[in-house]
């Protein structure tokens, strides 16, 4: 433990907080107020709607402002401060301050947000295949708290202001991507783009022709996707040769399927990097900025756009325009909407898809005039998404730097 600051005291989690095990009937729950480890987002990313409600008659009950922590594989850092009342599965711990005059729930949330808390839960977890946090050990976790409750309020308000802005940007990006998806679907799936008279093309009787993907508007190009894009595949240096992998700023970001799953529309960060020497020695293809990349092994169909030059592993395909410019946003939306089950039967697709099949994905392209009109609208939306993501990254870095300093009293408020 760090040196004790004046006006601060050292406590164990169990001295100031408790597990909540009150029950609620599952008949009172729905997809919007039931929380399980499956619908909690990694890295303190909040929660999503549940996909199902359990068959149990009752589950644990939580209230607004309680702290929920997924107790399975705690390295995923699924931590959320509830902003509504509801019920949670047994794998989600519900934690609440014993006395708000001693410690605020808001402050408690940031104590549990520190990396050293997650590290502690990992180190004390039980089991190997699916490690679970040790509930008794978690209550033995030690940390400092300022005795003055107003200091706790100030610290929590600084950190929550940053979190609120991060959440706002995430919500904005969600809305912007929904707008982009709606426009793409109307113009390029329903084919109701505005015709020369400004009327919806297909609904107004626009001429359609047959293609492998069904009817498409007359005059559009149709072929395998490799006829429109140069497609390359990433590569992994030998895993046993650890010298090729790096955390250094100077080295090359190296994307995995997991990274694609955690990215937004643009991929700004990767969990690992590889050295420049590895790029040359193993002839690993580098992907330029603003390139669409797609996962096609194990987890198929994760699509992102690179925000800078980077490399990827062998489960990811890269698409570079051949002769047509300004195709990035169209391709991103096309691949996000593509039915990958059409590449093979559902049970085998995860292992059967290979780079040859990816290169034969059917692809259509509207005429240049329509594409230009689409780009006028869509590039502004995507640029706003990119700016929001970059701001999120900066705010997250600031928050993560401030967090341990504020929670240890190193920075006074």
Image: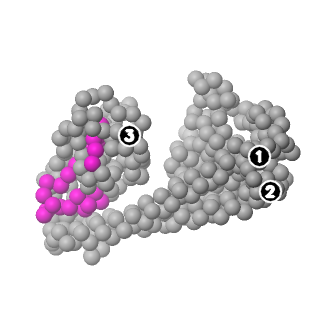
Q: Residues within 10 Å of mark 2 (few under 14, many from 20)?
A: few
Which SS class for mark 3?
loop
Q: Judge whether 390 appears above or below 310 on screen.
A: below
- The residue beneath circle 1 is 204
Q: Is residue 14 visible?
A: yes
Q: Residues within 10 Å of mark 1 (few under 14, many from 20)?
A: few
Residue 114 placed where, x, y %?
Answer: 33, 57
Q: Residue at x 75, y 53 (%)?
A: 199
Residue 84 placed where, x, y %?
Answer: 30, 51
Alpha-carbon distance for marks 2 and 3? 44 Å
- The residue beneath circle 3 is 31
> Which numbered disc, 2 or 3, marks the residue that appears first in the sequence?
3
Q: Residue at x 62, y 61 (%)?
A: 381
Q: Residue furthest bottom?
A: 413
The figure's colour scheme reads one colour
Give the mark toward the camera: 2 or 3.
2
Q: Nearer the viewer, residue 219 or 134?
A: 219
Q: Quadrant of the N terminus?
A: bottom left
Q: Residue at x 39, y 33 (%)?
A: 52
- The residue beneath circle 2 is 197
Which SS class for mark 2?
loop
Residue 21 placed where, x, y %?
Answer: 18, 40
Q: Nearer the viewer, residue 136 or 364?
A: 364
Q: Residue at x 67, y 29 (%)?
A: 342
Q: Residue furthest right?
A: 219
Q: State the extent of the magenta-drawn residues as a range.
A: 85-110
Q: Residues within 10 Å of mark 3 (few under 14, many from 20)?
A: few
Indicate whether residue 106 is drawn in magenta. yes
Alpha-carbon distance for marks 2 and 1? 10 Å
């Amino acid at each position: 433990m760090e040196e004790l600051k004046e006006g601060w005291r050292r406590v164990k989690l169990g001295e100031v907080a408790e597990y909540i095990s009150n029950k609620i009937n599952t008949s009172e729950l729905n997809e919007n107020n039931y929380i399980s480890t499956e619908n909690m987002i990694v890295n303190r990313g909040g929660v999503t709607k549940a996909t199902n409600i359990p068959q149990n008659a009752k589950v644990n009950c939580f209230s607004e402002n309680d702290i929920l922590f997924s107790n399975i594989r705690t390295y995923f850092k699924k931590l959320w401060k509830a902003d509504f009342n509801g019920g949670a599965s047994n794998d989600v711990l519900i934690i609440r301050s014993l006395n708000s005059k001693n410690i605020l729930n808001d402050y408690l949330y940031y104590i549990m947000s520190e990396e050293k808390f997650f590290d502690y839960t990992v180190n004390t977890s039980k089991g190997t295949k699916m490690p679970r946090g040790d509930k008794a050990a978690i209550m033995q976790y030690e940390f400092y708290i300022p005795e003055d409750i107003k200091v706790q309020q100030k610290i929590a308000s600084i950190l929550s202001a940053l979190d609120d802005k991060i959440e706002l940007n995430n919500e904005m990006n969600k809305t912007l991507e929904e707008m982009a998806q709606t426009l793409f679907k109307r113009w390029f799936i329903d084919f109701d783009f505005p015709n020369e008279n400004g009327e919806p093309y297909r609904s107004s009787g626009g001429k359609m022709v047959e293609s492998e993907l069904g009817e498409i508007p007359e005059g559009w190009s149709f072929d395998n996707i490799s006829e429109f894009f140069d497609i390359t595949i990433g590569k992994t240096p030998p895993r046993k040769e650890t010298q090729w992998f790096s955390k250094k700023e100077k080295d090359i970001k190296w994307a995995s399927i997991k990274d694609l799953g955690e990215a937004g529309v643009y991929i700004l960060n990767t969990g690992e990097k590889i050295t420049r020497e590895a790029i040359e020695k193993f002839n690993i293809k580098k992907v330029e900025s603003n390139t669409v990349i797609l996962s096609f092994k194990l987890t198929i169909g994760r699509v992102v756009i690179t925000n800078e030059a980077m490399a990827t592993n062998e489960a990811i395909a890269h698409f570079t325009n051949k002769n047509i410019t300004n195709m990035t946003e169209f391709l991103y939306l096309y691949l996000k909407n593509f039915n990958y089950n059409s590449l093979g039967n559902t049970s085998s697709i995860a292992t059967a898809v290979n780079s040859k099949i990816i290169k034969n994905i059917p692809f259509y392209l509207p005429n240049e005039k329509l594409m230009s009109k689409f780009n006028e609208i869509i590039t502004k939306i995507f640029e706003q998404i990119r700016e929001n993501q970059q701001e999120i990254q900066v705010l997250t870095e600031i928050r993560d730097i401030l967090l341990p300093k504020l929670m240890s009293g190193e920075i006074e408020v």
